[in-house]
């Protein structure tokens, strides 16, 4: 059984190995990583609606990957943009509207991921912080648009991967809901919520794969599905669980080292 208490410690033998973040049904997510020889366990921590429901991993969405051979010194390929997670803030460079091939670096000591969510029109960082860190039932609609969230996998401190973030032009909240290895509140409660402005960038899009750019624009202009936001508005438990429910299945790649 794969589970842990919210805010509880992470077992010392469990290392986050990256992989892809939440991926919508029918979509494909790709990451590039340097894997060291080890046994990797892949599991999907998404879950259906309701309290105390088994995760998809508990229902069998797991796999094992054996990486063999000698540890190499391969380098990650060059990316279009960078997202850096520290303890406890984000820095970004080069993000534009569309599909961004990012280098995601965790330069901190703790585990981090990125949940990138665009603001609703007129929302402020203060409203987003209050929403993301309060356990009280939200009043009115959330200040962010969960239907357009982009999520990365969880990385260990010192790790990096090349991943994709599909963004629209506008203001985003970059949020981490992971807790310290020793346990404690989600990093959002420690201030790990940063505002990021994503701009149009015609030059880079024009250089990119036109088919891919068209697909990205189509995604970004897809009509909102009001159904997707219902569970979140109704949710009165912690925002991390709300987010997990608002998102489709999530795939994580973890590595167990002796
Ligand atoms: Cu974090």
Image: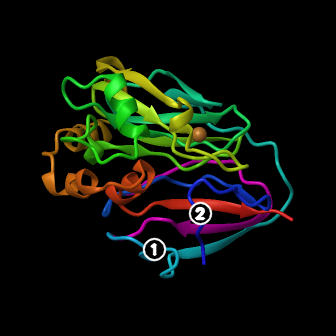
Q: Does residue 205 appear to the left or right of 226 in the view shown?
A: right
Indicate which disc residue 56 carries. 1
Give the quarter of the figure containing the N terminus: bottom right
Q: Is residue 27 left or right of residue 227?
A: right
- Point out the frontmost of discs 2 and 1: 2
Colour option used = rainbow
**Extreme residue in the front direction:** 136
x and y percentages locating residue 80 in the rendered image: 49, 28
Q: In this view of the protein, which residue sits in the foreground, 233 or 161?
A: 233
The number of discs equals 2
Residue corresponding to mark 2: 5
Q: Secondary structure at mark 2?
A: loop
Asked if residue 211 lies left or right of residue 33, the reply is: left
Residue 252, located in which quarter of the rendered image? bottom right
Residue found 65% across the figure and 74% down from its top: 64
Q: Earlier in the sequence, mark 2 or mark 1?
A: 2
Between 149 and 222, the one lying in front of the other is 149
Q: Quadrant of residue 134?
A: top left
Image point 25% across, 26% down: which residue? 123
Q: From what the image shows, is residue 194 above or below residue 150?
A: above
Front position in the image: 58 or 42: 58
Q: Which mark is residue 187?
A: none
**Magenta segment, which residues?**
28-48
Give the percent coordinates (x, y) of residue 100.
Answer: 42, 34
**Residue 3 versus residue 247 in the image, above or below:** below
């Amino acid at each position: 059984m794969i589970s842990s208490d919210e805010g509880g410690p992470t077992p010392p033998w469990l290392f986050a190995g990256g992989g892809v973040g939440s991926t919508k049904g029918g979509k494909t997510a790709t990451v590039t990583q340097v894997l060291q020889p080890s046994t990797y366990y892949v599991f999907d921590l998404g879950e259906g609606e309701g309290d105390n429901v088994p995760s998809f991993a508990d229902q069998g969405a797991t796999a094992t990957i054996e990486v063999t051979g000698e540890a190499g010194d391969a380098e990650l390929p060059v990316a279009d943009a960078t997202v850096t997670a520290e303890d406890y803030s984000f820095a970004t460079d080069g993000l534009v509207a569309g599909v961004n091939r990012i280098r995601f670096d965790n330069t901190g000591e703790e585990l981090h991921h990125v949940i990138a969510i665009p603001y609703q029109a007129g929302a402020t960082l203060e409203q987003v912080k209050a929403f993301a860190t309060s356990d009280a039932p939200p009043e009115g609609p959330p200040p962010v648009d969960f239907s357009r969230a982009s999520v990365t996998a969880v990385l260990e401190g010192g790790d990096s991967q090349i991943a994709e973030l599909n963004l629209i032009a506008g203001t985003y909240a970059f949020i981490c809901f992971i807790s310290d290895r020793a346990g404690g509140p989600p990093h959002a409660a420690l201030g790990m919520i940063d505002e990021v402005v994503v701009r149009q960038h015609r030059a880079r899009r024009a250089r990119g794969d036109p088919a891919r750019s068209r697909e990205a624009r189509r995604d970004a202009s897809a009509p909102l599905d009001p159904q997707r936001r219902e569970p979140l508005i109704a949710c009165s438990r912690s925002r991390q669980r709300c987010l997990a429910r608002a998102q489709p299945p999530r795939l994580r790649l973890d590595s167990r080292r002796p």
